[in-house]
Amino acid sequence: MRVKISRKAHFNAAHRLYRPDWSFEKNDAIFGKCNNPKFHGHNYDLIVSVTGEIDKETGYVMDMKVLKDLIKDEVEEAFDHKNLNVDVPDFKELNPTAENIAVVIWNKLRPHINSDNEIEVVLYETPRNFVTYSG
């Protein structure tokens, strides 16, 4: 029997959506207010879900404390109170859209979670705007 467990986390980060190979006008037309050269911030909510078989010995799909620590070490420490464009190497060449942030988070977590288990990342950029990535 496969069961999905989930852990919610939170981080605050600033970013600017733009492509350096485009003119300011084209960036402004595509990204609007998110193209602010002085950046802007979000209070991101993150839900990481792991789906797998329940271990017969422990009763867990995955120990929630292990998942909590993994999210803290791999995501919160890397992103919280950072300027994603400037402070996070993953976004030196990658536009930090919510879509790209979710994929980067998934890629950071995947090597640390049993390969038999599925991972889903849901990233809320605002209470009404969110992205889901499952690999």
Image (cartoon, rainbow, N blue to C red):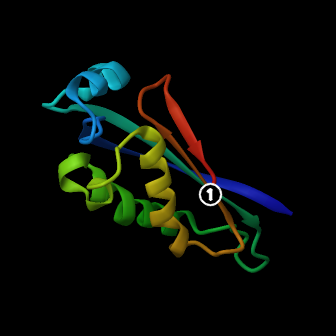
Q: Position of residue 22 (x, y in %)?
A: 27, 35
Most extreme residue toward the right is: 1
Q: Residue at (54%, 68%) from the top-left corner?
A: 110
Q: Position of residue 95 (x, y in %)?
A: 34, 44
Q: Nearer the viewer, residue 125 or 92?
A: 92
Quadrant position of residue 16:
top left
Disc 1 on helix, strand or loop?
loop
- Would you say residue 34 is visible in this rendering? no
Q: Nearer the viewer, residue 87 or 65?
A: 87
Q: Residue at (30%, 53%) from the top-left corner?
A: 91
When the figure is inspected, residue 23 is found, relative to residue 68, above or below; the finding is: above
Marks counted in the figure total 1
Left or right: residue 74 versus residue 41 is: right
Q: Position of residue 126 (x, y in %)?
A: 42, 27
Quadrant position of residue 104:
bottom left
Most extreme residue toward the bottom is: 57
Q: How many neighbours does mark 1 have within 10 angstroms: few (below 14), some (14-19), or many (20 or more)?
A: few
Q: Residue at (35%, 51%) from the top-left corner?
A: 94
Where does label 1 land, which residue?
A: 135
Instruction: Give amino acid for label 1.
Output: Gly
When the figure is inspected, residue 1 is found, relative to residue 47, above or below; the finding is: below
